[in-house]
Image (cartoon, rainbow, N blue to C red):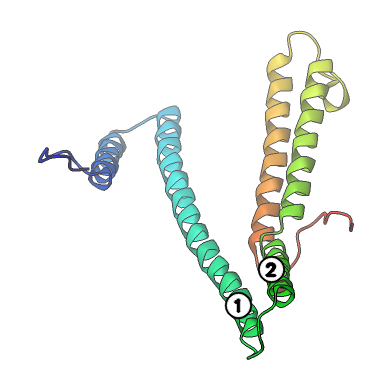
Amino acid sequence: MHFAGRDLPTLQRAEAELVSAQESLWQQKAVRCLDLPDRRSLYSEEVTTAIEQYQADSRKYRRIHNGLQSLIVIGSASTTSIAALDTGRELTWQSVTLTVISFAITMTAMFTGYYKFRECSYFLQQTADAIEEEVSAVALGIGPYSEYGPGQEDEALKLFTQRVEEHRNEQRRRQQQLDQPADQGAPSGQPPPG
């Protein structure tokens, strides 16, 4: 950002310089013959940067999409409500109240249908419960962790991490499916009706 004539770099310029410096560092490391752990470390750094970029782009496009969808919802409900008010009749408090209530119900129904708050809540709670179950099981040494005794905490922690990551990945898949239009399929494990 530029403040009062100070030549401070913008956030975009700083990010570009950081990316350039990372690429330069990765190229320097790649030129040398690295052993397997160093190559894995280098790859991990590259993947982390790619993940962050994908997530940032995803958030940006989701915000744009949700903003446009909100505009469509509000515009269509507003058009219907304004048309209901413009009947040429004298406006009474009953007709205005009825139109305002109708507008509010239409908006609520449209946003509820589009954003799927109930399904998101259900799946998030389901994932939280599954992870909480894993935490209890590893702490008490029961279930899949019952075969690990004293001195095998690393193996139990490895299994715990793997199982928690599976739950988290499943939650991400469900969220992606919820974000898809209805004609592309419903998420697995639908919440019960009601």
Residue at 67%, 63% in the rendered image:
111
- In this rendering, the answer to whether 89 lies above or below 158 is below
Residue at 84%, 17% in the rendered image:
141
| Gap in angstroms between the C-alphas marked 1 and 2 | 10 Å
Quadrant into which the N terminus falls? top left
Quadrant into which the C terminus falls? bottom right
Helix, strand or loop status at disc 2: helix
| Rendering quarter of residue 153 | top right
Q: Position of residue 179 (x, y in %)?
A: 64, 61
| Front in this rendered view, residue 41 or 190 | 190
- Under mark 2, the amino acid is Met
| Front in this rendered view, residue 153 or 81 | 81
* View extreme (left): residue: 5
Circle nearer the N terminus (1, 2): 1
Residue at 66%, 83% in the rendered image:
84
- Under mark 1, the amino acid is Ser
Whether residues under marks 1 and 2 lie with C-beta atoms below 8 angstroms apart, the answer is: yes
- In this rendering, the answer to whether 80 lies above or below 36 is below
| Front in this rendered view, residue 84 or 15 | 84
Q: Which residue is mark 1?
A: 76
Q: Which residue is mark 2?
A: 110
- In this rendering, the answer to whether 176 lies above or below 94 is above
Q: Position of residue 170 (x, y in %)?
A: 71, 47
Helix, strand or loop status at disc 1: helix
